[in-house]
Image (cartoon, helix red, strand yellow):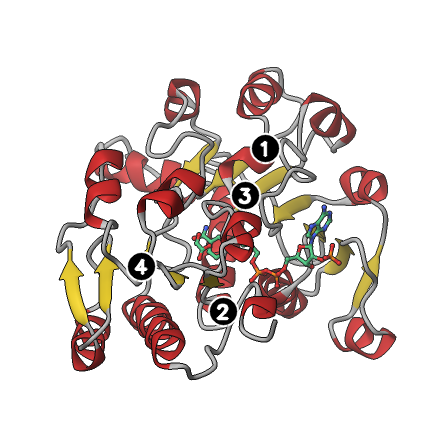
């Protein structure tokens, strides 16, 4: 008999087809987060769950799914999953690292450029028919080339942002808990500094950290005050890495110049103050949203799920100790 797999929301079709080859698939073909009650009820008999980043995979869910063997998240971030609880229950957890790195870095750089060069304001200005002549002082922004970028969280995505920054002749500072190999650091033309130095020296601060207890509100009132008044903050990590009310105040009071945000603490809710600010560029958590990348992510999650259910090694287990006790 084929194992039962629940797919909690719409994913790329080739991944659904692949799952059907080896599993009985309970596919929820809807592109919005599943309600908690529905999730708990549909997970009851699942041996595998292909989950989305907004599905809380907690102990209650695992309790309600006694046959669960694998949770395959269609995301690289896995702050929605209680990995420790899964490990204790012998459930393998997987994510989708690597396949979305470049696409996500592209969006981070797009937000940086859009905030610096006031792209959205310019677009609105033209569309509203307000453009009536060339003006030397219209929508003046900040230069990007030659400036200093500070990247907090310098893993796959942070390093991909650094490669883009080098093309703009930027000085690249980074912070992470463990240093990179000197050869990698040199190849990326980057220098490791502490968080305080990064905040003080960077013209652009880009957040590419996972959300954890340690990184919750990593940027708050104090950090924003430590940044340059001309600085631009870009967040493509997770909303809760930034204290949003502190960011609203910092932008209102001119403590920093602008921000580009792809992620929010209580998605899809966005603080009304951000919506009314012209110096904030907002995107709806789309950093990995290219056709190609979303398909790769879905296929990777599907393969991970099927691998565990058939006894093959998954490519990106987060708790490999479950596989090799
Ligand atoms: P990664 O390769 O694991 O990189 C994470 C980096 O953060 C590492 O350099 C890590 O280095 C550093 N880090 C972790 N905790 C830290 C701390 N407390 N202080 C300083 N640095 C810390 O992950 P990735 O693939 O680049 O993805 C990063 C995150 O981006 C994901 O977890 C996800 O939340 C987010 N993301 C968002 C989108 C989107 O659509 N907006 C798309 C993809 C990913 P150390 O361990 O040495 O500190
Ligand atoms: C998206 O936010 C991801 O973590 O993949």
Labelled pair 3, 1 in contact (Cβ < 8 Å): yes
Asked if marks 3 and 4 touch (Cβ < 8 Å), the reply is: no
Residue furthest left in the image: 29
The x and y percentages for residue 246 are 60, 20
Q: Residues within 10 Å of mark 3 (few under 14, many from 20)?
A: many
The residue labelled by disc 4 is: 49
Q: Quadrant for residue 189, please give it.
A: bottom right
Q: CA distance from mark 1 to mark 2?
A: 23 Å
Residue pointed to by mark 2: 102
Q: Quadrant of the N terminus?
A: bottom left
Q: Is residue 284 above or below residue 68?
A: above
Of the two numbered discs 2 and 3 on the same chain, state the one appearing first in sequence. Answer: 2
Earlier in the chain: of badge 3 and badge 4, it is 4
> Which residue occupies 67% across, 34% down?
230
Q: CA distance from mark 4 to mark 2?
A: 26 Å
Position of 7 with respect to 159 (left or right) is: left
Q: Which residue is the site of mark 3?
A: 235
Q: Is residue 286 above or below residue 239?
A: below
- In this picture, is 272 found above or below 126? above
Q: In terms of sequence position, does the residue under pointer 4 or pointer 2 come before the other?
A: 4
Query: What is the crowding at mark 1: few (fewer than 14 residues within 10 Å), some, or many (at least 20)?
Result: many
The secondary structure type at the circle numbered 4 is strand
Q: Is residue 108 left or right of residue 24?
A: right
Residue at 49% x, 69% y is 102
Judge depth for marks 1 and 2 and give the one in front. Answer: 1
Quadrant position of ligand 2: bottom left
Determine which residue is flagged by label 1: 242
Q: Nearer the viewer, residue 201 or 244?
A: 244
Camera-near label (3 vs 4) is 4
- For the question of whether residue 13 can be seen, the reply is yes
């Amino acid at each position: 008999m084929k194992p039962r797999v629940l797919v909690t929301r719409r994913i790329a079709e080739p991944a659904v087809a692949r799952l059907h080859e080896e599993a009985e698939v309970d596919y929820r073909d809807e592109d919005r987060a599943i309600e908690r009650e529905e999730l708990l009820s549909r997970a009851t008999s699942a041996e595998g769950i292909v989950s989305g980043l907004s599905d809380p995979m907690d102990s209650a869910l695992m309790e309600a799914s006694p046959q669960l063997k694998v949770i395959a998240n269609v995301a690289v971030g896995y702050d929605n999953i209680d990995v420790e609880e899964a490990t204790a229950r012998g459930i393998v957890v997987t994510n989708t690292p690597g396949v979305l790195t470049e696409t996500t870095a592209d969006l981070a750089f797009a937000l940086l450029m859009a905030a610096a060069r006031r792209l959205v304001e310019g677009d609105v200005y033209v569309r509203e028919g307000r453009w009536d002549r060339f003006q030397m002082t219209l929508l003046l922004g900040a230069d990007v080339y030659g400036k200093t970028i500070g990247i907090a969280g310098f893993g796959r995505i942070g390093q991909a942002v650094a490669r883009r920054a080098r093309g703009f002749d930027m000085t690249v500072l980074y912070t992470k808990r463990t240093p990179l190999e000197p050869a990698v650091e040199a190849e990326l033309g980057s220098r490791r500094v502490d968080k305080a130095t990064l905040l003080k020296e960077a013209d652009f601060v880009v957040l590419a950290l996972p959300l954890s207890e340690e990184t919750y509100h990593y940027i708050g009132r104090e950090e924003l005050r430590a940044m340059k008044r001309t600085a631009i903050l870009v967040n493509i990590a997770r909303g809760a890495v930034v204290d949003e009310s502190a960011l609203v105040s910092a932008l209102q009071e001119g403590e920093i110049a602008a921000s580009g945000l792809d992620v929010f603490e209580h998605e899809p809710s966005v603080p009304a103050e951000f919506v009314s600010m012209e110096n904030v560029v907002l995107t709806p958590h789309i950093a990995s949203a290219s056709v190609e990348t979303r398909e790769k992510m879905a296929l990777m999650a599907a393969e991970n799920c099927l691998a565990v259910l058939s006894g093959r090694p998954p490519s990106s287990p987060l708790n490999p100790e479950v596989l090799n006790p």
